[in-house]
Image (spheres, helix red, strand yellow):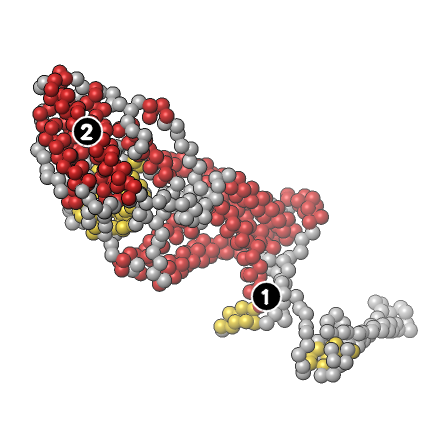
Amino acid sequence: MLQQTAGLWYIEARPINSTWVPGLTLRISSFMTKCLYWDERNETWSTDGCQVGEKSTPERAQCLCNHLTLFGSSFFVMPNHVDISRTAELFATVSDNFVVLALLCAFFGLYLVTLLWACYADRRSSSKRKMTLLEDNRAGALYNYLISVQTGHRKNAGTSANVTARLFGSEGESDTHNLTDPNKPVFERGAVDVFLLAAPFPLGEVRNLRLQHDNSGGGPSWYINKVTVQDLQTRQVWQFLCGCWLSADRGDGMTKKTFNAAKNNEIASFRNIFQTRTSTGFRDEHIWVSIVDPPSRSPFTRAQRVSCCMSLLLCTMAINIAFWNIPVDQTSPVLFSLGSLQITWQEIMVGVESGLLMFPINILIITIFRSIRPRIVLKSRNKEEGNARPARVTVPSVLRETEEIISLLIRSPRNKMSNIYNLESTADLLPALDKLHELIQLMQGVSESEPHWVYCSKFLLGGLSHLMLCLEQLDERDFLSAEEYQRTRNITNLLVRKAEMVFTSHLAYCPPPVKRKKGTSGCWLPWWCVFLGWFLLLSLSAVSTYFTLLYGFQYGREKSIKWVMSLGLSLFQSIFILQPLKVIGIAVVFALLLKPVAVEESEEIEEVLLEQQRKCRQYTGRETL
């Protein structure tokens, strides 16, 4: 504890000759200072070990002590003082000093123009965000894979051709599927397209992916960057690091390629993680760059990003003008010195205080917008589900359906089915049904149940149920004889009952995998939190604008012009130097820690799965599948 005592004496001396102009006044002041500390042992004030320093003034005492004593000092650097009560008076000077007001009007005008463009771009990209349920999925196939295809960012990387894909696993292979969506363009430059592929049984460990296009359209060349395949039942993920052209006139001139699944060391390599993190960082974490090309599947829209940038800019302006050109504290200790460059404690504290005032609330707003769960409204399908039977059934369509069911089941070696020739007449139906009967007997004889037999029996039950519905719409005139027609119906009905018993038996001993619990893929906020984000954003922007104008009117025109120039340098440094360095630094850290990028999950998966189940119920006429 320090105590200072001081006294002042004033002596005025005037000359005798009072005609002397302007006269002489002599003022002499003296003060007395004493340094004391509280002696806790004797419980009294003491001067032992303390003396007054030569830098003492009437307002401040310098004490030099040879023992430890508690001292108090100011920790924070106060911003420039502004009198809020003079708001009306300062705002009345706008005609003399419109520099800051003109700058804010320019920023707000640019913001409104950019916001209109962002809303238009969001409306266009909203349709591209949807997941695609492949139209050529078999309606009875319910083992689902999510295929995420990432087109590269190179010039003319998108394709106008029709692309097909096929998966090869350790326990079978899928059919060749057309990766197309009638409601949106696919495989545009820099786009990420997600498709739901349904297989009749688990493919096991996915080892290969075959991609091909027909080289059609005005720009068929396609640069494929990466493909991710996810088993929605087991949540297992395989990545295919393609990084090549599928083109007749670029790269190696091939439009059909088979890619191998990446190994763990390839996925966790420094190069792969660094490239992925850098691309994601600039498109999502660099708030300014992300306005132009945000991630296609991010809930953080362009309009929200533009508004967050405006809020961040206004907040930066308010803090910058509050601490601009503050008096330099000569007594502030120098913490770092390199030649003529010196960093003082005062400068460090200004930086810390600016960060504490600016970043927490802005980071909170960005986090809210980034973490809002998309609002998905499931459409009612009751009327469509009520019409379970096909609109028109012919003998060729029945033969084709039966042939497709067998051709899909023989793709798994575990089913031990031989291929069949084309079914040309109703006489070929009975041999085809005999092959399906052999498969049912094989599944009955399996001692240990597992997911393969569960989904195979489910697919077979669905296919036979659909075939039974089709036969009911035919009559005996479509067959060679009434006896053949009746026998075909009886055998099909018998196979349906047997397939149902086999499916129930396997399902009891090997239930399907438990669905992922909600909330395990991350922390999502309810959709109405968007209103909270906008409220915080507008409030922060209004407060920042008010104080920026208040300080600008108080500084005057000349100082305001100097502040605008220093603000421009600060913004340039933040946008083009600090933000990119932050993104690259984070990418390097993640790459050194060998932490792969997490696979994105979305609530839209549930909607697409429900759509596939609805198609299955309509196809089979059964509610239990």
- Give left or right: position of 30 versus 194: right
Mark 2: secondary structure = helix
- Residue type pointed to by label 1: Gln
Give me the residue at 39% from left, 41% from top.
603
Structural distance between the alpha carbons of marks 1 and 2 = 88 Å
Give me the residue at 60% from left, 59% from top.
325
Residue 487 image position (x, y, % from top left): 13, 23
Q: Nearer the viewer, residue 424 or 372?
A: 424
Q: Which of 358 and 317 is in front in this view?
A: 358
Give me the residue at 26% from left, 39% from top.
505
Give me the residue at 60% from left, 58% from top.
323
Label 1, residues with CA under 10 Å away: few <14, some 14-19, many ≥20: many
- Give left or right: position of 452 versus 576: left
Question: Can residue 412 be seen in this snapshot?
Answer: no
Q: How many marks?
A: 2
- Give left or right: position of 567 versus 422: right
Residue 409 image position (x, y, % from top left): 17, 38
Residue that badge 2 annotates: 494
- Residue type pointed to by label 2: Leu
Q: Vertically, is 261 above or below 352?
A: above
Q: Nearer the viewer, residue 463 or 226?
A: 463
Mark 1: secondary structure = helix
Quadrant into which the C terminus falls: top left
Residue that badge 1 annotates: 346
Q: Nearer the viewer, mark 1 or mark 2?
A: 2
Q: Vertically, is 346 above or below 239?
A: below
Quadrant into which the N terminus falls: bottom right
Residue 390 image position (x, y, % from top left): 25, 23
